[in-house]
Image (tube, coloured by chain):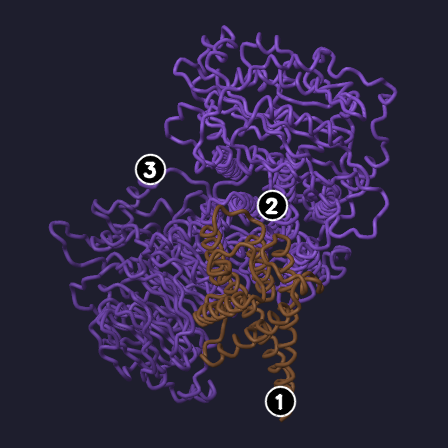
């Protein structure tokens, strides 16, 4: 029973960490987008801190917590533990590349949106190949990216917020790529955290 | 993974490449570790050289901030902060430094006439600038509030900065700051008209080589150079330029009237530029919090990445130092990248601070970490340079693979054709390459220094004060560990006195040693690093320098130099003709602009960057106005305005300027006018054909040019390095392929850091007596038995080298009682028994003693014909001339001299000496042996079959001893021989097993149960195992039936309790019985047979190894795993079993379970011999390479190149001392370090015969064959590191 309690507390701790990482990244990355006037929020919500809708960071945080917990869970379910580059430095590199992709999407001038989308897609796939290389990761990334795009679509459709220059059914066409890269990144972090916890548990059992 | 380093015999291209890369890295590692200081200096020099262009580059700051207000309700903001700031930025307070009013002129000759020359495209449009200038200068607005002219409103400038004298003719001084292309000609139309080549004039002022982003051309034209259209290759035939007026105060009415006046004069029909916004540009260094947060985040992530990466550095002396080195490597490579790109003309437009973290992340610290990890995981006891080399070599493939992958990814990114990404990729590529360069040179060297430091520190700990001890007294010279026995054991450590060693060290080495001891190099590097970091901090964009610059610029009074006292002067003196505004009416009204379809609104400026168009230029140049013209200054470098103002010592830092909406002016000139304004030389000077590419193409190709130049520079760098490498490095530098076997005598091998072997002379003891090449060698530690091709077996005392017994090929009769035999008789029988058969007509004469004497003269003659050789031992006879190598002639058997005296076993030493004294008969050739004594191939399997390979005659009974009635087979040759106690077991080609008494030279028993030749023998305890050519394995038991009386005398010599090295007395009746014969133990001939630890291991050509139990000859395992015949097997008391095959593979087996422990490919060709120590496996192969492997991991530690044909001879004397045979010499190697300790020359001639067999005796001596001689070498003590 103690191990159960330990397990749940660990889960909660992990979830909290992932949540905070997600919130932080959402705030920072949104700042990038706001600088570029990519997203426009209704004027009444824009007065909130960090010039973003209040509900965006928590949503991102929750989503990242879910993703970060889901990845190691699926790994263990599938029985193929992720062995590729399990190091914090690699995770940090992954996060940096993710921020870089966001940066590129926000600040680099592209000739047209197709080019932007294609470049971002290539970058996202490159991110997956460099830091993940697992089929489950790819599938989950694609699935969640599609779901998130759909959700964004619904939100925009209902007028919760809008994009300055939508190019694909009210939203930006590069959104799925960003979501995919984000999913890969959060999954990477989640796996690393799970690995750490696993190690700690192992050490404890060894001590016992 | 060491296994990857060892290619199997047939390699694919990939593996060959891999091996090449690995070898190259290995050599490079050796180079780096050997010359750390020069390499670090060289690297630092290259870094500084590559970063030098950065000094000339204006430091990248953060971009200017803009704020847009409407023109209509514009008022100069007040200084006081207002309550309702709204979205007003903080800096938008007080009047700006200046207002910038640009008049954007687009001019074209239209319609274009085919009679026009390219110069006409821009000459007349440029010529119109002067009338426009006059118009602007003379514009006066008068209304109720008064009369205003430009003079009153414009920014009055004084002197240019002292450093800009060359610009005095171009930039205005002491007057209105009004710049236009007309400034090139001092605003005088006459000068322009008389200028034969306006382009040249423009080009004259361009800076050579490196151009910063704001050139004079940009300043005067006010549009980026490629957009001006002033070029011979302007396909659009539209010329664009601006007249920039800098105003110090804003007057709506004056500007409005100017605008309307110009518009009225030069209407722009389809111009829809908005003119209701003015942009305030703030040039502050501070960054807003909103931009700072993402920036800071990326930097935090970057530092986390660096932290987590460098945390993995372990097992080194200074973690911090190495982490610093890693970071320095990455940062310097980035700086080098920027520097190189700048050198080749690419000006960075990206914000350096923003992309920097991503560049670091892309380049990464991975390689550095992998290198460190790989190097520290090499065996600690290896020498430093070998560790570095191995570490590099182990990771070479992955490093190259990663690098290739990253380059590929970046190249893909380059082809996205997005300029920003392209630029990023360019930086990343150059950064990657320079990072690789720095890793290889800078970091590897630092790592070697670090590891050496660690090693030195460890050694200092281990040997606290030993070096400081006074030299030991001559009496007890023995080191502390040395055991009392008189001969020093090889395992002892003899530490020479330091003074003595220093004397022996060359001066150069002493200097290096001094450097190493005082850690001078490290200190210099540390100081250099600190200085470097200081420079970095100082030159960092956000660092000290900008701060200082800002401070200085803040304190300097604006517009001093007393210029304020000057009255407002009339502009640039020659220009400003006071004239009435009406004079400008002389300007021709523009012709009707050609009607333009609206859908052609894509301005030529927008598409200017898209590359040259092959299409025919339009006959009517179309002047179009697009949105991009609205704020054309945005396309200028953001340093445009600061640099313009800085020429007059006005800083814009932390201040702002207001840019007013441009005034569009469209000029259409008729071809008539264009022709009129021509300079006479215009038509005579056709545009110089190529190399001047069109401006568009030029700018477009910049990236590619930079890439090509960078690539060329890289190739050049590589070539340079290669040359440097060749110069610095001897051809065979490191281990793999070294031939330092040829070291001259007395030349001490000693590496740069003072590791030196002990100074001791080893003189080999030559055992002479055999007439032909020695075929078999066997020893049990005390005795040494050798058998030559002639079939003669000699027994030597392994301690003294005395010949104890000679068993000639023919039964020697000797008196059994005394063990002494008459040599004359012996030689009689030598003569008598020589090959009784006749071959062809060449019938051999039996020469007896008398004949021998008679032929002695001929012998002497032959001896003289042989060139005299220097004598090695003056007291010993030189027998070499006696060797008859001429096998074609009838070789008489001969007897050299009558024996000096009878041999007496009572005085062994004396007799042995006499044996040496007496020139022994030498040659004993026979046709068959002549055929077989051709130079032996190194192939292990092709054993030199000697005399009697094809037994022609049945065995002859020649020998009879007192104890046994045994027959010796003289016609078949001895293929295998073993020695235990005083019994020699000899296996003959006829399948006969003989047991000889080693001391008495008598045949004790023989066994003829088998008919197939015995290829290998093992003699363990009381059992003999014989492997036969047909693949069968026979187990014999040696039984001793002692006479009754002796039983009590000798104790209890039970069969079961046979001592390991039994001593068989001559009285014993020895019988040898076949206990078991395993027929078809192998499908093919058994090639190797080894026995130890109660196991018999056989290897055969059928690719299998079998393990038998010695006691019951039961086959325990059949080990399969080789893909070729087994050529070498090693097994020792600790049950270590290793096997090597013809496929070049080496397998390690677990004898208890029969499982394969490891499997490595080590050699190209057969593995010829194998030895294991507790930590490593030593193998030699047909490729004459000796490889040393880590036994537990199977990783190749290093390899030693042997001389041709000597590969198979190797032995291990102690855990750390390896001995190998060479051409006429044996070499001693330190196993731990792979260092050559000493080479001992066996003969005096420099190119003696190769040592093919080598036997290590228990008493730290080695025996090797040396042609027909044996050489007994006593091994000196082992070395110790100096430090």
Q: Which residue is drawn at 46% across and 26% down?
A: B694
Secondary structure of the residue carrying tag 2 is helix
Q: How crowded is mark 3: few (under 14 residues within 10 Å), some or many (20 or more)?
A: few
Given residues A132 and B555, the one toward you in this image is B555
The chain letter for the residue carrying disc 2 is: B
Q: Residue at x 74, y 12 (%)?
A: B573
Q: Judge from the rendering whether residue B1047 lies leftward or rightward of residue A175; answer left or right.
A: left
The chain letter for the residue carrying disc 1 is: A
Place of residue B905 in the rendered image (x, y in percent of width and height, measured from the top left): 44, 67
Q: Name the residue under label 2.
A: B333
Q: How crowded is mark 1: few (under 14 residues within 10 Å), some or many (20 or more)?
A: few
Name the mark nearer the viewer: 2 or 3.
Answer: 2
Q: Which residue is drawn at 48% across and 77% down?
A: B1134
Q: Hey, which residue is sitting farthest front in the picture?
A: B144
Name the mark nearer the viewer: 3 or 1.
Answer: 1
Colour of chain B in the image: purple
Split into 4 quadrants, where in the image is the C terminus of chain B?
bottom right
Secondary structure of the residue carrying tag 1 is helix
Q: Name the residue under label 3.
A: B865
Residue B260 appears in view: yes
Q: Mark 1 points at which residue?
A: A3
Task: Work out how far the residue at label 1 is from the one at label 2, CA to CA, in angstroms.
Answer: 49 Å
The disc, 2 or 3, on the residue closer to the chain's N-terminal end is 2
Given residues B381 and B787, the one toward you in this image is B381
Q: Judge from the rendering whether residue B1180 lies leftward or rightward of residue B381; answer left or right.
A: left
Secondary structure of the residue carrying tag 3 is helix
**Which chain is brown in the picture?**
A
Residue B536 drawn above or below residue B806:
above
Given residues B465 and A85, the one toward you in this image is A85
Place of residue B1255 in the rendered image (x, y in percent of width and height, measured from the top left): 44, 62
Q: Which residue is drawn at 49% across and 72% down?
A: A82
Tell if the residue under mark 3 belongs to the same chain as the one under mark 1.
Answer: no
């Amino acid at each position: 029973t103690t191990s159960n309690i330990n397990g749940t507390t660990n889960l909660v701790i992990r979830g909290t960490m992932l949540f905070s990482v997600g919130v932080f990244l959402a705030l920072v990355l949104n700042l990038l987008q706001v600088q570029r006037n990519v997203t426009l929020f209704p004027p009444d919500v824009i007065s909130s801190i960090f010039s973003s809708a209040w509900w965006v960071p928590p949503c991102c945080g929750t989503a990242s917590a879910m993703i970060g917990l889901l990845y190691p869970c699926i790994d263990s379910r599938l029985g193929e533990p992720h062995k590729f580059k399990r190091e914090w430095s690699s995770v940090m590199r992954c996060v940096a590349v993710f921020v870089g992709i966001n940066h590129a999407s926000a600040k680099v001038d592209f000739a047209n949106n197709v080019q932007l989308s294609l470049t971002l897609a290539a970058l996202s796939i490159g991110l997956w190949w460099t830091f993940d290389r697992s089929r489950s990761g790819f599938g989950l990334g694609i699935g969640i990216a599609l779901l998130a795009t759909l959700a964004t679509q619904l939100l925009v459709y209902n007028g919760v917020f809008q994009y300055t220059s939508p190019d694909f059914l009210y939203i930006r066409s590069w959104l799925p790529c960003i979501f995919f890269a984000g999913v890969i990144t959060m999954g990477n972090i989640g796996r690393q955290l799970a690995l750490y916890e696993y190690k700690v548990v192992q050490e404890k059992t060894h001590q016992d | 993974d060491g296994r990857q380093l060892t290619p199997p015999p047939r390699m694919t291209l990939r593996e060959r490449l891999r091996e090449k890369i690995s070898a190259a890295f290995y050599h490079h590692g050796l180079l780096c570790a050997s010359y750390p200081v020069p390499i670090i200096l060289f690297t630092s020099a290259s870094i500084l050289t590559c970063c030098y262009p950065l000094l000339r580059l204006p430091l990248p700051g953060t971009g200017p901030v803009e704020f847009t207000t409407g023109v209509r309700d514009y008022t100069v903001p007040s200084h006081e902060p207002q309550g309702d700031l709204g979205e007003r930025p903080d800096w938008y307070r007080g009047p700006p430094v200046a207002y910038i009013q640009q008049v954007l002129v687009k001019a074209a000759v239209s319609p274009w006439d085919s009679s026009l020359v390219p110069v006409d495209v821009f000459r007349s449009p440029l010529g119109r600038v002067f009338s426009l200038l006059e118009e602007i200068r003379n514009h006066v607005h008068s209304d109720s509030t008064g009369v205003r002219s430009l003079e009153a409103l414009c920014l009055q400038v004084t002197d240019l900065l002292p450093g800009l004298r060359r610009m005095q003719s171009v930039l205005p001084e002491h007057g209105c700051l009004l710049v236009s292309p007309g400034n090139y000609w001092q605003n005088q139309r006459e000068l322009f008209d008389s200028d034969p080549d306006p382009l040249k004039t423009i080009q004259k002022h361009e800076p050579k080589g490196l151009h910063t982003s704001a050139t004079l051309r940009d300043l005067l034209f006010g549009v980026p150079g490629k957009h001006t259209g002033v070029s011979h290759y302007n396909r659009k035939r539209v010329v664009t330029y601006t007249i920039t007026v800098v105003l110090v105060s804003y007057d709506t009415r004056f500007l409005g009237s100017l605008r309307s006046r110009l518009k009225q004069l030069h209407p722009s029909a389809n111009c829809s530029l908005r003119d209701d916004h003015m942009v305030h540009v703030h040039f502050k260094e501070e960054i807003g919090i909103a931009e700072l947060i993402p920036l800071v985040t990326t930097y935090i992530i970057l530092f986390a990445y660096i932290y987590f990466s460098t945390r993995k550095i372990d097992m080194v002396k200074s973690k911090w130092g190495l982490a610093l080195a890693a970071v320095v490597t990455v940062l310097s490579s980035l700086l080098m990248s920027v520097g190189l790109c700048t050198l080749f003309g690419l000006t960075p437009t990206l914000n350096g601070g923003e992309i920097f973290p991503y560049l670091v992340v892309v380049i990464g610290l991975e390689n550095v970490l992998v290198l460190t990890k790989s190097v520290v995981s090499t065996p600690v006891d290896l020498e430093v340079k070998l560790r570095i080399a191995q570490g590099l070599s182990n990771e070479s493939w992955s490093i190259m693979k990663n690098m290739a992958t990253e380059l590929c990814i970046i190249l893909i990114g380059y082809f996205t054709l997005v300029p920003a990404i392209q630029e990023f990729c360019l930086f990343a590529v150059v950064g990657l390459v320079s990072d690789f360069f720095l890793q290889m040179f800078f970091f590897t060297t630092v790592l070697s220094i670090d590891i050496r430091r660690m090693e030195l520190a460890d050694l200092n700990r281990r040997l606290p004060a030993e070096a400081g001890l006074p030299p030991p007294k001559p009496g007890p010279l023995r080191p502390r560990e040395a055991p009392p026995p008189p001969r020093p054991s090889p395992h002892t450590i003899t530490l020479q006195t330091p003074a003595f060693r220093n004397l022996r060290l060359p001066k150069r080495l002493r200097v290096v040693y001094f450097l190493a001891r005082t850690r001078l190099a490290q200190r210099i590097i540390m100081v250099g690093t600190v200085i470097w970091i200081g420079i970095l901090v100082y030159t960092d964009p956000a660092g000290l320098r900008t701060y200082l610059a800002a401070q200085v610029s803040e304190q300097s009074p604006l517009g001093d130099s007393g210029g304020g006292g000057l009255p407002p002067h009339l502009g640039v003196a020659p220009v400003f003709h006071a004239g009435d505004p009406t004079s400008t009416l002389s300007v021709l009204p523009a012709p009707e602009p050609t009607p333009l379809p609206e859908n052609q609104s894509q301005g030529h400026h927008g598409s200017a960057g898209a590359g040259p168009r092959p299409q025919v230029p339009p006959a009517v140049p179309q002047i179009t106005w697009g949105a991009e013209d609205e704020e054309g200054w945005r396309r200028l470098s953001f340093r445009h305005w600061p640099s313009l103002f800085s020429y007059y010592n006005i800083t814009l830092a932390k201040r702002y300027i207001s840019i007013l909406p441009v005034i569009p002016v469209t000029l259409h000139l008729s071809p008539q006018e264009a022709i009129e304004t021509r300079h006479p030389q215009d038509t005579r000077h056709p545009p110089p054909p190529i190399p001047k590419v069109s401006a568009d193409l030029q700018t477009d190709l910049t990236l590619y040019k930079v890439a090509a130049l960078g690539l060329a520079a890289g190739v050049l760098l590589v070539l340079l390095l290669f040359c440097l490498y060749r110069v610095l490095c001897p051809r065979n530098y490191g281990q793999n392929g070294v031939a330092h076997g040829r070291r001259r005598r007395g030349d001490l091998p000693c590496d740069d850091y003072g590791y030196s072997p002990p100074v001791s002379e080893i003189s080999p003891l030559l055992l002479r007596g055999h007439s032909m090449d020695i075929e078999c060698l066997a020893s049990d530690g005390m005795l040494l038995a050798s058998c030559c091709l002639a079939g003669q077996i000699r027994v030597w005392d392994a301690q003294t080298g005395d010949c104890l017994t000679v068993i000639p090929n023919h039964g020697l009769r000797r008196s059994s009682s005394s063990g002494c035999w008459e040599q004359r008789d012996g030689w009689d029988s030598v003569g008598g028994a020589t090959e009784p058969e006749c071959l062809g007509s060449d019938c051999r004469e039996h020469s007896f003693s008398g004949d021998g004497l008679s032929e002695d003269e001929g012998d002497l003659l032959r001896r003289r014909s042989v060139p005299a050789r220097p004598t090695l031992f003056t007291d010993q006879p030189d027998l070499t001339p006696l060797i008859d190598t001429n096998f074609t002639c009838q070789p008489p058997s001969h007897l050299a001299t009558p024996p000096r005296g009878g041999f007496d076993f009572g005085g062994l030493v004396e007799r042995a000496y006499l044996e040496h004294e007496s020139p022994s008969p030498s040659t004993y050739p026979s046709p068959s042996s002549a055929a077989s004594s051709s130079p032996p191939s190194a192939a292990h399997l092709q054993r030199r079959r000697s005399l009697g390979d094809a037994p022609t005659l049945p065995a002859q009974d020649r020998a009879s001893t007192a104890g046994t009635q045994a027959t010796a087979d003289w016609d078949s040759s001895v293929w295998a021989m073993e020695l235990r106690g005083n019994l020699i077991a000899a296996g003959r080609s006829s399948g006969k097993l003989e047991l000889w008494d080693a001391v008495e030279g008598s045949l004790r028993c023989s066994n003829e149960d088998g008919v197939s030749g015995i290829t290998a023998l093992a003699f363990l305890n009381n059992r003999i195992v014989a492997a036969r050519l047909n693949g069968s394995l026979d187990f014999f038991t040696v039984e001793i039936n002692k006479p009754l009386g002796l039983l009590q005398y000798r104790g209890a010599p039970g069969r079961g309790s046979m001592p390991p090295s039994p001593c068989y007395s001559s009285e014993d009746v020895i019988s040898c019985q076949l206990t078991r014969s395993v027929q078809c133990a192998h499908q093919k001939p058994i090639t190797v047979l080894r026995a130890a630890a109660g196991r018999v291991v056989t290897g055969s050509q059928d690719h299998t190894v079998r393990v038998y139990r010695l006691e019951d000859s039961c086959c325990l395992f059949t080990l399969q795993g080789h893909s070729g015949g087994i050529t070498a097997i090693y097994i020792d008391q600790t049950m270590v079993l290793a096997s090597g095959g013809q496929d070049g593979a080496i397998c390690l087996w677990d004898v208890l379970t029969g499982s394969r422990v490891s499997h490595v490919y080590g050699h190209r060709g057969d593995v010829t011999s194998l030895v294991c120590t507790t930590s490593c496996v030593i193998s030699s192969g047909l490729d004459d390479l000796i490889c040393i492997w880590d036994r537990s991991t199977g990783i190749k530690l290093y390899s030693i190149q042997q001389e041709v044909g000597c590969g198979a001879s190797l032995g291990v004397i102690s855990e750390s001392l390896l001995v190998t045979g060479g051409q006429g010499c044996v070499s001693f190697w330190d196993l731990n370090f792979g260092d050559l300790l000493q080479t001992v020359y066996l003969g005096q001639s420099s190119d003696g015969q190769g040592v093919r067999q080598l036997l290590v005796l228990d008493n730290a001596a080695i025996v090797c064959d040396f042609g027909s001689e044996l050489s007994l070498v006593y091994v000196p003590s082992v070395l110790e590191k100096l430090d």
